[in-house]
Amino acid sequence: MSEQIQPLDAPPSAWQRFLDSHLWHSFTKDRVAQFSLLIFAAYAIMALLAPLIAPYNPYDPAQIDILNAEMPPSWEAGSDPAFWLGTDAQGRDLWSTILYGTRVSLTIGLCAVVLQALIGIVIGLLAGYRGGRIDSLLMRFADVQLSFSTMMVAIVVLAVFQATFGTELYQELAMVMLILVIGIAEWPQYARTIRASVLAEKKKEYVDAARVIGLKAPRIMFRHILPNTLSPILVISTVQVANAIIAEASLSFLGLGMPVSEPSLGSLISSGFEYIFSGSWWITVIPGAVLISLVLVMNLLGDWLRDVLNPKLYKG
Amino acid sequence: MALLEVNNLEVRFGLRSGEVTALRDINFSLERGERLGVVGESGAGKSVLGFSILNLLSKPGYIAGGEILFEGQNLAAMSPKQLRSIRGNRISMIFQDPMMTLNPVLTIGQQMVECLLAHRRISRTDARRIAVQKLKQVQIPSPETRIDQYPHELSGGMRQRIVIAIGLLMDPDIIIADEPTTALDVTIQAEIMDLMLDLCERNSVALMLITHDLGIVSQMTRQAMVMYAGRIIEQGPTKEIINDAQHPYTQGLMNALPQMALPGQRLNQIRGSMPPLQNIPTGCAFNPRCDYVMDACRHELPGFTRSGGCRVACHMVAQMKLEEEAAARALEVN
């Protein structure tokens, strides 16, 4: 026999199992997914290593010279070779600022989604598993929360905070506030998705079996049901990170997000917007392109994950 | 005192269309090491009975009356905490479909260890050792490897063995097996049954076997009860019920076995089907399907009549017994 038969007493390693999995198989077939993951990985590395890659530190006022303001990118006439993508209105190197901005945007996006997921998972599990009045109550909360748009809640909360505690404190806490506001405003997405899958899982016999062996309800919810609802959680997480990044960018654009001294991609776009008609298009367009491609690849990855993890959508 | 004693158990479901009684007048007892078969068509209330013994009926079902005494303590009136210490520990339950009963995302070992840790204060390594030992008891080959596998990596028969191993994990006093072999093919079925019989005898575990397979009941159990539309209609020693069924329904079940039909003929069947719980016929619930229906059957609920070692709820049997007695008395007088 030419084929090697795996001996029974050698279980395949986790890595081997991953290579044999449907997930990996589908990934090797899907060019869009490969391309998206590549770009996303590039952004993630750029964001992580920003202090090492960036030629300047945009947070350090000593390295900024107002005389360098509004330099065009290096391929345009009148540029300075020291600034690859040009500079913004305050003379910061745009390349360095984008690197740091991506870092801020990704951090806010990821943390906000972790917060959303925590609140949403707990509430969704409780509502789905307990059912009855608790379910109705929690889901009405979710409905109310969803009937306010995220932006509206965020604008009101952030504006009130800014007005009561002053701009200075706000600038210090901007990141935390953004994470909190975006995280709290979007939990119903998770709660609803999880509740729906819990309702389906709850009817399965393994839940009865877990009750029969005398396990407590929280243990059944978190240990037995939650892992079975993981695939929808994964899928919405990718989409939600993209949404959170957009929400942060929109808020920053409205002047309620990250301060100009510590810009995210959104506040960078916003700060350049005033100069777009004076010809300094690059301050808005380049961070804009970065933001769009980042969100796009995340959505593409989310689509791919949804197709792979949903067996009903297997494409021949 | 019996290990398990069920007195006048009544279970209802509070549906939107009104209350429905799923079980009523359930009386039986189970001794240590005894094996009891519960037989009936789908919808007779067999599984509901299994669940209500553990007080695990899910909404909208609830225990409306009666008591379930386990070692003298009433399970129907226990706090959730007390119940948890009995479930899985003293009384365990095995379900029909082993594919569905095991959690697909946890390894066999994780599921077994978890059950042990929920009931005993032992270390993880000790729990794992016990789990391996139990897997060996149910004749799983190379248990040290299998324990780290996921349910989907095992065959149906192997999965059911694992479910049984989980059932035996805490050395319970009672195992309630709800159609444990329905999802398996016949050869595996025989193996699993032999295994359960052997394990129950060796550890003197009481077994309550819920099934619609009369063959399994006759092979596995000493006592049996037949249920119809939420009531017990005949109960007694398995041998008597199988060899000399009194109730027309039990007779019908026996006649429906393929081996009772003559070659080339249609199989015998009980005509009609089980009535829905919302409109159970008045009188004897079986009367619309019964070949021997009498006037009394349509109006009056039959009480139990003794017949040999059995109790039968049937007007016809009662009447026959009366006639027999009268005849016997007439003989004596003469």
Image: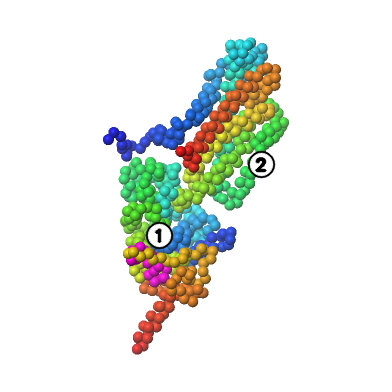
Residue stretch in magenta: B245-262
* Colour convention of the picture: rainbow
Label disc, if present, on residue B211 of the rendered structure: 1
Q: Chain ID for label 2?
A: A
Amino acid marked by disc 2: Ser
Crowd class of label 2 (few under 14; some 14 to 19; many from 20; radius 10 Å): few
Circle 2 SS class: helix
User: Which residue is at 41% across, 70% downward?
Assistant: B248
Residue designated by label 2: A147
Looking at the image, can residue B238 be seen? no
Residue furthest out toward the right: A163
User: Which residue is at 53% across, 39% downward?
Assistant: A233
User: Which residue is at 71% across, 33% downward?
Assistant: A160
Front one among B105 and A313: A313
**Residue B134 at x, y percent in the picture:** 35, 48
Judge left or right: residue B55 versus residue A240.
left
**Residue B105 at x, y percent in the picture:** 44, 42
